[in-house]
Amino acid sequence: MSVAALTLMAACGSDSGSVSQPEDEFLDKVEALCVTAERDADKLDLSGDGSDAIADYVEIITVAHDDIEDLDPPASLKKDFTNLVGDLDDQITQGKRLVSAIDGGDQAEIGDQIAALVELTTETDNAAKALGALQCRRIAPDVNLIGLGTDASIPDQTVPVDTTPDSTLDTTVDTTPATTLDTTAETTPDTTIDTVVSRFSTDLSAVDLAPEGYTWVTDFTQTNVDELYSTTVLGPLVTGYEAGQLVNDGGGTASIFVITLTTPWAEDSIGQWLFWERLDEGTEAVTPAGRTVMVMPGAFDNTDCLGFYEASYGIAVCTFAGEDGKPILDAYIATNPR
C-alpha cells in the first residue's frame, strides 16, 4: 500500500511547530467522523440490482477518508493513523472496482470484487483497533453486501431479446432445446456470489426458547458472518453462529448471538471472538448468577454488549445503552442450558 503522500503530509504538519494535541482528544475527532460515516453507510440498501448504492458507499467512505486525512495526529499515533487512512483509501479504490464490475455484468468478477472489498474492510478494522479508534471498525454495510448486483450483472445477455423480432425469437426457441438455455443460465448463477460471500447467522428463535417475560422478534435481520468465518484461528472452528432478538412487554429489547465451536476455547480463539463481538476492550463483571462476563459499554452506537464463554460455546448479549444485560444473559442460559 502506498502511503508516501500521507507520510509527507504528516511530516509537513510536524514542521509547523504546533504543539500536538493529546491522543484522546485526537481519537475523539477521528471516531466522530467514523460514526458519521457508519451511520450513513448503514442507511444504504444494497439489495437492489444496480451499482448506485455502492457508488453512494464509495462517496461516504471518500468523505470520511478526506476528513480524517486532514487531521494532524500526535507523533505517537502517526504510523497507525497513516495505516488507517491508507486502508480507507484502498476501500475507496476497491469500491470503484466493484461498481465497474456490476456495470460490466461479469458475475464472476462481481463475486471477486465483493470478496476483495470484504477483506479490505477487515484490514481497516485491524488498523482502527491498532490506532485506538474503535468506532472506526466496520465502516461498511457488511450485511447487505450479500447478493449485491445479482440481477444487474446479467440484464439481457442470456436471451437476445433486442436483436431479433418476436417471430424470430419463436423460431429460435423452437429449434433450440430448453436445456441449452438452462445451460447458458447456469454459467452465471446467483450462487457465484453466494460461494464467495454468503454466510449469515441462523435464526436463534428456531432452536431456543425465549426467557420468561420475553418473546422472539420474528423479523430480526440475521447477521453477516463472512468476516467471522474468515478469521485465522476462530473461523475454522465455528460449527454454527445463531442470532435473534428478544423483546419484553415493556418494549425492552436484547439481541442474542450464540457461537458454537468444534473445540474448547483457547486464548487465541477467545481473542478473535471478543474482537468480533466488539468486546475486546471491555472489562470483566459478574452476573447475578455468578458468571464472569466481558462488558463493553458503547460497543455499538447507543448499544452496550457483554459476552460469556465456556466449554465450546459463547453468548453475546447487546442491549440499549444503560440497560443491564447481565440478568438477561442469566435468564436466557437458564431457559436454554447447554
Image (cartoon, rainbow, N blue to C red):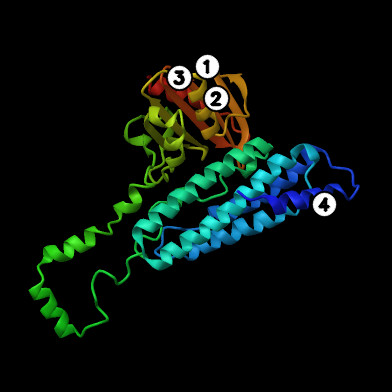
| Disc 2 secondary structure class | helix
The residue sitting at 58% across, 44% down in the picture is: 124
Whether pointer 4 and pointer 2 mark residues with C-beta atoms closer than 8 Å, the reply is: no
Q: Earlier in the sequence, mark 1 or mark 3?
A: 3
| Circle 3 Cα neighbour tier, 10 Å, few/some/many (<14 / 14–19 / ≥20) | some
Residue wearing tag 2: 326
| Circle 1 Cα neighbour tier, 10 Å, few/some/many (<14 / 14–19 / ≥20) | some
Q: From the viewer's perspective, is 324 left or right of 164?
A: right
Task: Give the distance between the C-alpha atoms of the residues marked 4 and 2, in whole angstroms.
Answer: 49 Å
Q: Which mark is residue 12?
A: 4
Q: Which mark is residue 265?
A: 3
The residue sitting at 45% across, 58% down in the picture is: 46
| Circle 4 Cα neighbour tier, 10 Å, few/some/many (<14 / 14–19 / ≥20) | few
The residue sitting at 84% across, 42% down in the picture is: 21
Q: The disc labelled 4 sits on which kind of residue?
A: Cys
- Up/down of 207 relative to 251, above or below: above
Whether pointer 1 and pointer 3 mark residues with C-beta atoms closer than 8 Å, the reply is: no
Task: Give the distance between the C-alpha atoms of the residues marked 2 and 3, in whole angstroms.
Answer: 21 Å
